[in-house]
Amino acid sequence: MIKMKDEADEKKLQLRGQYDFFDEKDRWQFLSKELAQKQELLHQIMRNSNDRVTTQMDSEEEIRRLHQGSLENQRVLERVQ
């Protein structure tokens, strides 16, 4: 009977990635690892979002600059005519 219990416990450990959730230390290790992974994912998403915003702002500035140049060119043409 004890052997079957040990085998069942081993299967539980294997299914859970070698963590024994009944052991407080293992549970905290698992939760800490999960938290670190989720924090890294959030930081990556934030960096990507910031990069996109910066790129969009640069594009908008380029459009404004080109539009301003276009208006200046139009004024010069009007003066020449």
Image (tube, rainbow, N blue to C red):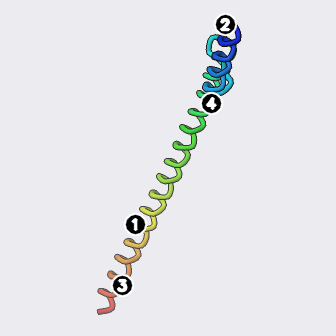
Q: CA distance from mark 2 to mark 3?
A: 97 Å
What's the residue type where badge 2 is placed? Met
**Pointer 4 and pointer 1: residues touching (CB < 8 Å)?**
no
Find disc 1 in the rendering and name its residue: 64
| Most foreground residue, 29 or 61 | 29
Mark 4 Cα-neighbour bin, 10 Å: few <14, some 14–19, many ≥20: few
Find disc 4 in the rendering and name its residue: 36
The picture places residue 57, in percent across and down from the top left corner, at: 45, 57
Residue 79 marker: none
**Residue at 52% across / 42% down in the picture?**
46
The part of the image, by quadrant, that contains residue 36 is top right
* Relative horizontal placement of residue 46, taking residue 32 as reference (left or right): left
Could you tell me which secondary element the residue under label 4 belongs to? helix
Residue 76 marker: 3
State the residue lying farthest toward the front: 1
Q: CA distance from mark 4 to mark 1?
A: 42 Å
**Pointer 4 and pointer 3: residues touching (CB < 8 Å)?**
no
Q: Is residue 72 above or below residue 21?
A: below
Which circle, 4 or 1, is nearer the viewer? 4
Could you tell me which secondary element the residue under label 1 belongs to? helix
Q: Is residue 41 above or below residue 51?
A: above
The picture places residue 73, in percent across and down from the top left corner, at: 37, 82
**Residue at 63% across / 16% down in the picture?**
8
Find disc 2 in the rendering and name its residue: 1
Which circle, 2 or 3, is nearer the viewer? 2
Q: CA distance from mark 4 to mark 3?
A: 60 Å
The part of the image, by quadrant, that contains residue 66 is bottom left
| Most foreground residue, 1 or 33 | 1
Q: Earlier in the sequence, mark 2 or mark 4?
A: 2
What's the residue type where badge 4 is placed? Ala
Q: Earlier in the sequence, mark 1 or mark 3?
A: 1
Which circle, 1 or 2, is nearer the viewer? 2
